Image (tube, rainbow, N blue to C red):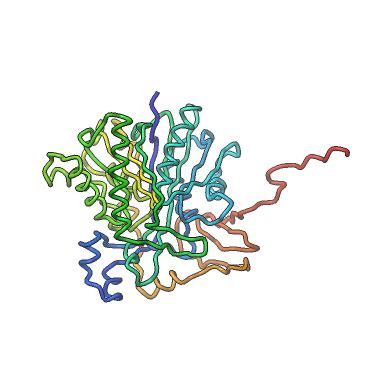
Amino acid sequence: MKFGLERIAVEVPRHSLDLALLAEARGVDVKKYHQGIGQEFMAVPSPDEDVVTLGAAAAERALEGVDRNRIRTVIFATESGVDQSKAAAIYVHKLLGLPRNCRTVEMKQACCSGTSALHFALASVALEPESKILVICADIARYGLGTAGEPTQGAGAVAMVVSSQPKIATINPKVGYFTDDVMDFWRPNYREEALVDGKYSIKVYMHALEQACKAYHIETGEGFDSFQHFCYHLPFTRMGLKAHLHLAKVVESSLTGSELHAQVQPSLQLNPKTGNAYTASLYMGLLSLLEQQEDLAGRKVGMFSYGSGCMGAFFSLEILAGYKEALPQESSQEILAKREALDMATYETWYETRMPQDGSAFDTPHISDRPFRFAGVADHKRRYERLDGRLEHSSSSASEHFVAAPLPDS
């Protein structure tokens, strides 16, 4: 029995910032953004968008035509969590109206947790082949205004349905891992913006790539020449090409420069327009590859996932015949085309928007036109709203969920 991806879908914020505006405002040559890091636009969430609304909207698309009663687990991978205890998966579970007999968890290890979620999903389906697992990767990348990391900010979500009836790709359960305790990128609990040592992080990324690929080769016997295409974690778009050329040099590949570009370039079409989406970035690259005009059926794809701190994972998948029919009706490029442009003043105002830290009532302005929106906070409880206007509170009355049994006589 084969296991893998039955569905995959993306969501991005409604608004974006042209990096030409950012370059002008920061006194930087725009070529540093367009050519140096390969970024053109930055996806910017409005105050009523967060990882829950992005993840729920991506999942709504991914679940088109899927029997929701067979969803047994929702795994939400993010490093932009909205609560230190309650899983974002629970908010999404309710917004989507999924069955109560369902496990909901949240996973974290920087940008790599989406890949761990995917492989945990494979294991779950292997134990219960009639089930389906919903994996959501959603993040909002934030760095300080005016910092070197600012132009690499972004946001987005990818949702995947993993099952024993894959329609898009089968996934090899063997994975090459590499873990090391380093401080290349981190975000303490008391900060909303990440801290990063950029040059060091790139060095660590490359080392993790080498080691994870070696581990994968030991596990499977497969090497660089086993794959026709590659997808990489993309903190910025140029990183994908840098990583691929580096790996080709390490393994002493005989492919020409144009041949190496052809292996990775199809996966780099979304990131320039969205920026870094952390856990979702690798899978946005996969969707970018899948949406190419060329028929990829039967081809093997090498996948490298990197999470700062650090952990690397290299695995592979094989694209199935007829996969195009399982992709969402609305393509990622069509979704991007519907975005609205931001000016610098609005971008900076939204960036500085903060919720009260004392739990007092806070209502967000109604800006987003996506299926779900973050409505605000009351009594320390997050509130979400559907497009039909129905509020979904973070905690419902106990009577909605269970009837308390009487205590036994003492």
> Which quarter of the picture shows residue 212?
top left
**Which residue occupies the extreme right position in the image?**
410
Asked if 325 appears above or below 354 in the picture, the reply is above
On screen, residue 87 versus residue 169, left or right, reads right
Res. 408 visible in picture? yes
On screen, residue 35 versus residue 204, left or right, reads left
The image position of residue 90, as x and y in percent, is 56, 47
The image position of residue 271, as x and y in percent, is 30, 54
Q: How many labels does the image show?
A: 0
Asked if 294 appears above or below 344 in the picture, the reply is above
Query: The N terminus is located in which quarter?
Result: top left
Query: The C terminus is located in which quarter?
Result: top right
Judging depth in this view, the residue of 64 and 352 nearest the camera is 352
Judging depth in this view, the residue of 101 and 241 nearest the camera is 241
On screen, residue 54 versus residue 147, left or right, reads right
Asked if 4 appears above or below 19 in the picture, the reply is above
Res. 319 visible in picture? no
> Which quarter of the picture shows residue 24?
bottom left
Q: Residue at 53% of width from left, 47% of height from top?
A: 89
> Which quarter of the picture shows residue 187?
bottom left
Judging depth in this view, the residue of 357 and 133 nearest the camera is 357
Q: Residue at 33% of width from left, 58% of height from top?
A: 275
On screen, residue 357 versus residue 44, left or right, reads right
The image position of residue 285, as x and y in percent, is 30, 47
Q: Residue at 43% of width from left, 73% of height from top?
A: 349
The image position of residue 391, as x and y in percent, is 59, 56
**Which residue occupies the extreme top position in the image?**
1
**Which residue occupies the extreme front position in the image?**
181
